[in-house]
Image (spheres, helix red, strand yellow):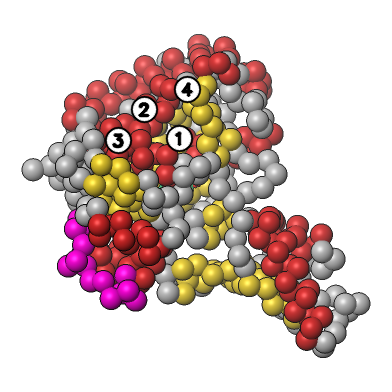
Amino acid sequence: MERYYQPEIETASREQIKQWQSERLVKQVKHIWDNVPYYRNKMEEKGVTPDDIKGIEDLHKLPFVTKDDLREAYPYGLLAKPLEDCVRIQSTSGTTGKRVVAFYTQHDIDLWEDCCARAIVAAGGTNKDVCQVSYGYGLFTGGPGLNGGSHKVGCLTVPTSSGNTERQIMFIQDLQATILCCTPSYAAYIGETMKEMGITKDQLSLKAGIFGAEAWSEEMRRDIENTLGIKAYDIYGLTELSGPGVSFECSAQSGMHINEDHFIAEIIDPDTGEVLPEGSKGELVFTSITKEAFPLLRYRTKDICMLNYEPCPCGRTHVKMCKPMGRSDDMLIIRGVNVFPSQIETVLINQGYSANYQIIVDRVKNTDTLDVQVEMTPEMFTDNVGEINRRQKELVEGLRSMLGLSAKVTLVAPKSIVRSEGKAVRVIDKRKI
Ligand code: DLL
């Protein structure tokens, strides 16, 4: 029988959900208008006041918010509560300089952890489970979010964080972990390492995995399920909205239920901003209607997606989103770290190279690889291997400190990278996802 963490909410009628959304939206818009001058200006520019927002049917009147707004308002410009009421920040992975910093009151954390707890229960979790959280802890939301959710469910929580794979496997075995939470690529890597260590799935007690933070295919799901002997569930979220748990998969494994009592989802045309009819493919936009410290109205995620309002066999009534099908901007997610091509370009140009480069991303043995091919300028061109190695090493170091990732760098001869007559193709993503 299907179990729920908050049954009265997760199986509420559509009318009830809409009513919650309308009431909370009206309240949220007022809260933001009263407390965030940055937002009030944006609304005034669009000629909207809180009086114009009477329910979800008026949502489209509000201005969008983008990552650029978040950067512009960094760090405190979108804060809607006094600092003394805030107890935590989390931050997006990978980007340097003006990162996105999200703030939480204790109440915000409480609701976020409820969302993660819903995901754990949907994956079959109870207080008898041992839940190993192998997402990174720290500024990244993955570790703290699932950790909090696991506590709420009453699982014995094993906060291993990511890395040290052999130790992860030792804990999975010794503590008889039943639920594993990490990125899908890390789950696959754990599976590979297990094989190398001669450990088979029959020696483990794992039954479920809660994997997200990056795109992964159905093929990858099957592989992980077979290798670890589990059912693998998808989970989605973003720092700006709280973190993991904006949506999660249930036993039907056919899309992720959006926690609509906290987030209103819209699908828009990424070029025109127009709201698209039910069932269309477009950019996913979220409004957080219960966040106190860092509420966002109509936040453009850049994730391309579709929503499915058909009833789900699990009994949950909240709308399902499909796996994100790509992004409308150029952000790459490599080993779970957000990487913008522009950051790579900055490193290259700072070290004296021209903007003739190509970024090749691939997935080898379930791990993302980043290969940057860069042209030497005619002035620096040399066939001295020692000199080339030294330069490549300098770039690898520069990229590591900019991105927090190790990349392979290959210097190539001047004019050897194909020039484009239209938009340059800088990124070749060979990952089949
Ligand atoms: O990745 C939060 C998270 C942690 C989700 C752990 C799930 C599990 P950010 O680092 O801010 O937050 O990255 C958010 O990651 O806009 C998507 O493009 C992508 N993403 C997140 N979950 C999924 C998923 C966390 N299940 C960005 N499938 C989002 C595909 C995902 N892409």
Nearer to us of marks 3 and 4 is: 3
Residue at horizontal 52%, vertical 47%? 302
- The residue identified by callout 4 is 105
Residue 40 appears in the figure = yes
Q: Earlier in the sequence, mark 4 or mark 2?
A: 4
Q: Are marks 1 and 4 in contact (CB under 8 Å)?
A: no
Q: Tell me if 397 is positioned left or right of 66 in this view.
A: right
**Separation of marks 3 and 4 at Cα, in angstroms:** 18 Å
Q: Specify the amino acid type for callout 3.
A: His
Residue 56 appears in the figure = no
Q: Specify the amino acid type for callout 2.
A: Leu
Q: Specify the amino acid type for callout 1.
A: Ser
Residue 356 point in image, percent of width and height: 76, 71
In the image, which disc is placed on residue 111?
Answer: 2
Nearer to us of marks 3 and 1 is: 3
In the image, which disc is placed on residue 151?
Answer: 3
Asked if the magenta segment contains residue 195, the reply would be: yes
Q: Quadrant of the N terminus?
A: top left
Q: Tell me if 247 is positioned left or right of 422 in this view.
A: left
Q: Specify the amino acid type for callout 4.
A: Thr
Q: How many C-alpha atoms fall within 10 Å of the one at disc 2: few (<14), some, or many (≥20)?
A: some
**Separation of marks 3 and 1 at Cα, in angstroms:** 17 Å
Depth check, front residue: 295 or 371: 371
**Residue located farthest toward the right when viewing the structure as drawn:** 379
Depth check, front residue: 244 or 51: 244
**Separation of marks 1 and 4 at Cα, in angstroms:** 11 Å
Residue 118 point in image, percent of width and height: 27, 37
Q: Earlier in the sequence, mark 3 or mark 4?
A: 4
